[in-house]
Image (cartoon, helix red, strand yellow):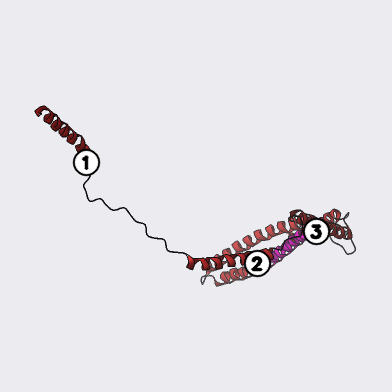
Amino acid sequence: MSGLGRLFGRGLLDWTPGKKEKGPTPEEAIQKLKETEKILIKKQEFLEQKIQQELQMAKKHGIKNKRAALQALRRKKRLEQQLAQTDGTLSTLEFQREAIENATTNAEVLRTMELAAQGMKKAYQDMDIDKVDELMADITEQQEVAQQISDAISRPVGFGDVVDEDELLEELELLEQEELARDLLTVGDKEEEPPVELPSVPSTHLPVGPEAPEADEDEAALKQLAEWVS
């Protein structure tokens, strides 16, 4: 098989106009491109080695064998051209492979989105927007009724007419003003209370408790002496 046959496979070279063949899947195309890229990378390495060999050959002959040196440089130039072509081909294959990979990813994303849309459609297939609006209206109405019931239950219940709180506050303010005026009038009529008189301090010395029994004994002794003399 020729080099092109090994590089691109027999499918491309055996193609004939009007012949319909089943195309490869994106995965197969990507795999084929990767294999081709590996072949081109090996070719790059081979060409780079040959270029270095021809360069060393030209340096070896130099001025001694000018003809051989020129031939080595010509071969080096052709190899460099082949290397540049290989580089361009490899870049094209890499770009094509990346494009197929991106297309495959996008297709998978679209399939996933389609499945999600179908699942959402199935989830809402039994729902009607008019029924949903009617249900929400009923819920709102029931909430309003519940709020009215709560307000009615929490409202204070009394007997007779409802007393106006503002009126009560006005009456309380009048009572406070009357009480204040009464206090001001009674302040001036209050009489001064007489000062409290304290008892005077006695001027005589009071007998001390322990000395009283001794005085009684002296008085009894004198009385006994007088009776004995008489």
The first of marks 1 and 3 along the sequence is 3
Kindly indicate the quadrant of the structure image that contains residue 48.
bottom right
Vertical comparison of 220 with 29: above or below: above
Q: If the image is split into quadrants, where does the N terminus sit?
A: bottom right
Amino acid type, mark 2: Glu
Q: Nearer the viewer, mark 1 or mark 2?
A: 1
Q: Which residue is mark 2?
A: 170
Residue in the picture at 68% in, 68% down: 88
Q: Is residue 87 magenta?
A: yes
The stretch in magenta equals 83-106
Q: Which residue is mark 3?
A: 144
Front residue of 25/229: it is 229
The first of marks 2 and 3 along the sequence is 3
Q: Secondary structure at mark 3?
A: helix
Instruction: Calculate the distance from the C-alpha at mark 1 to the C-alpha at mark 2.
Output: 73 Å
Front residue of 91/192: it is 192
Q: Position of residue 226 (x, y in %)?
A: 12, 31
Mark 2 surroundings within 10 Å by alpha-carbon count, few (fewer than 14), some (14 through 19), many (20 or more): few
Mark 3 surroundings within 10 Å by alpha-carbon count, few (fewer than 14), some (14 through 19), many (20 or more): few
Q: Secondary structure at mark 2?
A: helix
Residue 181 in sight here: yes
Q: Which residue is mark 1?
A: 208
Q: Position of residue 197 (x, y in %)?
A: 34, 56
Q: If the image is split into quadrants, where does the C terminus sit?
A: top left
Front residue of 75/63: it is 75
Vertical comparison of 27 with 177: above or below: above
Kindly indicate the quadrant of the structure image that contains residue 214.
top left
